[in-house]
Image (cartoon, helix red, strand yellow):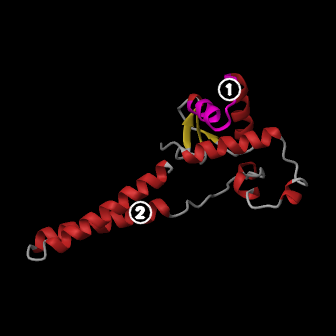
Amino acid sequence: MSKLEEMVAFVKEQIQFHSERASHFEKNKFRREKHLETANKFNELKTFIESPVPIKYTHPEQLSLALSPSDIVDLPDELKSELSIGKTDEEEFTIVRILEHAGGIMSLDQVLIGFYRETGVVMKRATMNNRLNRMMSKNMIFGVPGKKGVYSLAQIIEAC
């Protein structure tokens, strides 16, 4: 279960808890209303977490033309063999999966560990760093502003 899925499960538990508590306090209007209000706020949070983030491209270079694991997962082998997917691409797909399972943000060290656990291959730090930089140039992943060696599946923009 990814971090995001864990957070959604937690929020759902809170909605259920506060809804049950509200029904428990039928005779105490103030406490009932407070629990209902809290349940509604958690429900809004759940909706916000689960809603897709719209992507706005202000520059053509922000558009990624790279294939992702989800693009090819359900394709027949016959079609996959026609695509130009090499060992490097498969390793990049593995890195994307590792980031997805971790909630979308990881440090270089965490990626190295995750890659080893997923594949059993010990990748040299410099090789992984080069791979991540290549993935950044293809807009498959993004560097986290102000955090050296930290990578994200979504572009994070620093607040002014």
Residue at 58%, 61% (x, y): give it: 54
Residue type at tag 1? Val
Which residue is at 68% across, 26% downward?
Answer: 122
Kind of residue sitting beneath label 2: Lys
Gap in angstroms between the C-alphas marked 2 and 1: 38 Å
Task: Say above or below: 48 vs 111.
Answer: below
Q: Nearer the viewer, mark 2 or mark 1?
A: 1
User: Would you say the residues marked 2 and 1 are in contact, meaning their CB atoms lie under 8 Å apart?
Assistant: no
Residue 90 percent coordinates (x, y):
76, 43
Using the image, determine if residue 114 lies above or below residue 102.
above
**Residue 117: percent from the left, percent from the top?**
61, 34
| Residue 13 in the figure: left or right of residue 87 | left
Main SS class of the magenta portion in the image: helix
Secondary element at tag 1:
loop
Is 117 within the magenta?
yes
Residue 122: give its label: 1
Can residue 38 be seen at all in this image of the molecule?
no
Residue name at image x 70 percent, y 56 percent: 70
Residue marked by disc 2: 46
Which residue appears at 67% of the width and 56% of the height?
Answer: 57
Magenta stretch in the rendered image = 110-125
- Residue 22 position within the rendered picture, expressed as x and y whole percent measured from the top left: 19, 71
